[in-house]
Each structure stands twice: as C-alpha cells, then as structure tokens.
Amino acid sequence: MNETTPAPVAAVPAPKKTPAPAGGGAPREEPAAETPLKQRLAELVQRQGVLAVLLAVILVASFVYPTFATLDNARGVTVQASFLAVVALGMTLVIITGGIDLSVGSVFALGGVLAAWASQWGFFTALLVPLVVCGAIGLLNGFLIARAGMAPFIVTLATLLAARGLLLALTDEGATTYLVPKDSAFAELGQGSVLGFGYPLLIALVLFGAGGVLLQRTSFGQSLFAVGGSSDAAGLMGLPVARTKILVYTLSGLLAGLAGALNAARLSSGVTIVGVGMELDAISAVVIGGTLLIGGAGSVSGTLWGVLLLAVIQNLINQIGSLNSSYQSVVSGGFLIVVVVAQRYLARSRRTT
C-alpha cells in the first residue's frame, strides 16, 4: 500500500534550444524546468499529512496514558476500526470519481441483518446473501447516476432510506433480532484471530492492498482518476465513463454489505441500530486521508490513516473517561474543517507554481 496520490498532470515545458555555436554544430538543449519545491511540498503534505498527525497523536497519547500503548489496546482499536475501514475503502473509490454514497450506513446495517438471518444455512449463505443484496443496491445507485443522469446525493439518499426501511421490515420494526449460531464457521470469521489480531482486521488489510493495486496498477484505476478529473474529457478520450461509475457504486455496496456481515459475525447477531451516521464517518476518513471531494485525486493508504486517526481519537476519549462519545464528533468535525481548508490552500498554491 505504497501508492501515492496522483496529482493533476502539469504541462512539462519543452527543452529550450539555444542558437548553434559560431563554429557550427547542432543547437544545445537546455534541461526542462524541475517541479518547484513548493509544489512538491504541497503534494507531500496532501499525501502524507494525515500519517504525520496520526503518529504525533499516538506518540503523545502513549506518554500521557500508559494503558494506551499496550498490545491489547492496539488490538481492540484496530479491530473496531476495520469495519469502518472496509466501508471507507468503497467510499474512496466513489469520491475519486467525483461522486458520493450516502447509503453505506444503512447498507452496512442491512448486510449485518441479512448475514445473521442467513447464517442458519451455513457459512457461504451468510456471506452470499448480504453481498448479493447490498451489491444490487450499489448497482442500482450506479445505474441511476450513470445512465439516468441523476445526482449522486439524491440517489444515494433515497437508497439510504430504502435500505433502512427494508431492514426494519425484515426485523418487524426492530423487534426481531437474528442470532448467529454459536461456534459456527461464520461466527469464527468475526471473532477469530491470528496472533491476537482479529480476522476482520486482516480482511480489511487485504482489501486495502487490493485497492492500492487497483488504483495504481490497472487501467480501471486510472479511469477512476480521469473520470473524477473531468467526465467530459474522459468521455472524449474514449473511456467508459458510465460503466466506471456503475462499477464503483456496485463495489461500494458490496464492501458495505461485507463490513456489515463481518460486524454481525463479531457480535453474533444482526443488530438493527448500527450504521447510523456511518456514511459521515466514512466520508470524514476519506477526506481527512487526502482524497479531494471534487474527485480526481486520492489514495487508499490515506483513507486507512484517516480511519485509524478517527479510531485513535475515539479511544483517547474513552481513556480520558470524563468525556462521552459526543466529543468524538466535535474533534472529528474540527479535523475535517482543518483538512478541507488545507486542501483548498494546497490546491491554490499548486496552481500558482
């Protein structure tokens, strides 16, 4: 996951030619101007700024709270963050294309309920049912946005409500809670671990590795950046703009459903009240990680650092003890405002260099 955020391609000045020497010979070419230092620094801050903040927060917290820098605490923080990370990975792909997906929180909750309900028929059914249904919701989002030309905000807001309504219908308005059979293979998927680190964390890391390869080593990944930079220009280049958007929204639905299924396996039940506001947390993590809301630039590694930063903040609030979870929203909102302002400043500085 060493990918970097692709920056807008700047025109490289052609080498300047000087007149031929008096004694004859070919004109000498002067080397092209190098990228200004200010622009390189701006790109570096956008790509790795959140990682520097994360490391600083961890360092300070380790000195202030002895229980923070323990292996058990690290395991708890990372496993808890893995569900949001999987959802935020799909959100990263969507935002890079210049879109938004507000339905992921409800789709996450729906995926958990469907997985718990289907777990009575075995491991594969428990995974397949939420992936099919949630992937279909993502496919619907992509089709309405790409083919019907509808606004992503409106479409995904509608499917947010629809997914939450379907969840309530399946659970009799929340009165019925489906349980995952104890000691089943599906429950082990959420509760098992390797070297003390849970399977959900390992799955999230594998998915992020695959996401990094997808963005940086495939033509589809480059198409995402092109579509996010300018859909019209991407279309003129012959890129499949509509198909690209449909695929990213489908992936977003699939990943949200998978995260919900993993959460149900960990909790051994399909909890109906989870996922409320999760779409906002996912968007915050993506933007804090350096992905531009206007699209065209971003990285999955930045999103991973953003998710971990939000998780560390929540853990620090728990460490303090005298503060409740509401303060996480205050701190996260503050981080988000700072990052957006910094992105605007960096973008302006790069345009003027």
Image: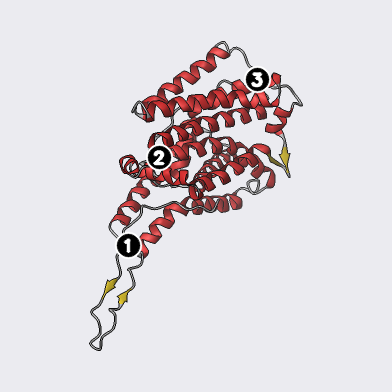
Query: What residue is shown at x 42% (from left), y 39% (from top)?
Result: 95
Q: Is residue 318 left or right of residue 25?
A: right
The residue pinned by badge 2 equals: 97
Q: Is residue 280 left or right of residue 230?
A: right
Name the secondary structure under disc 2: loop
Question: Where in the figure is residue 131, as x and y percent of width and height?
Answer: 57, 27
Q: CA distance from mark 2 to mark 1?
A: 25 Å
Quarter occupied by residue 125:
top right
Query: What residue is shown at x 40% (from left), y 60% (from top)?
Result: 41
The three-letter code of the residue at mark 1 reads: Val
Question: Where in the figure is residue 293, as x and y percent of width and height?
Answer: 38, 41
Query: What residue is shown at x 44% (from left), y 51% (from top)?
Result: 5
Q: Give the crowd class for mark 2: few <14, some 14-19, many >=20 residues within 10 Å.
A: many
Name the secondary structure under disc 3: helix
Residue in front for this viewpoint, 160 or 127 = 127
**Residue 295 visible in image:** no
Residue in front for this viewpoint, 167 or 71 = 167
Question: Where in the figure is residue 225, as x and y percent of width and height?
Answer: 41, 45
Q: CA distance from mark 3 to mark 2?
A: 34 Å
Query: Where 307 falls versus 262 (above or below)?
Result: below
**Residue 204 visible in image:** yes
Query: Where 332 falls versus 162 (above or below)?
Result: below
Q: Are marks 2 and 1 in contact (CB under 8 Å)?
A: no
Name the secondary structure under disc 1: loop
Question: Where in the figure is residue 150, as x and y percent of width and height?
Answer: 34, 27
Image quadrant in which the C terminus is located = bottom left
Which comes before the other along the chain, label 2 or label 1?
Answer: 1
The residue pinned by badge 1 equals: 12
Q: Is residue 265 left or right of residue 42?
A: right
Q: Are marks 1 and 3 in contact (CB under 8 Å)?
A: no
Label at residue 118: 3
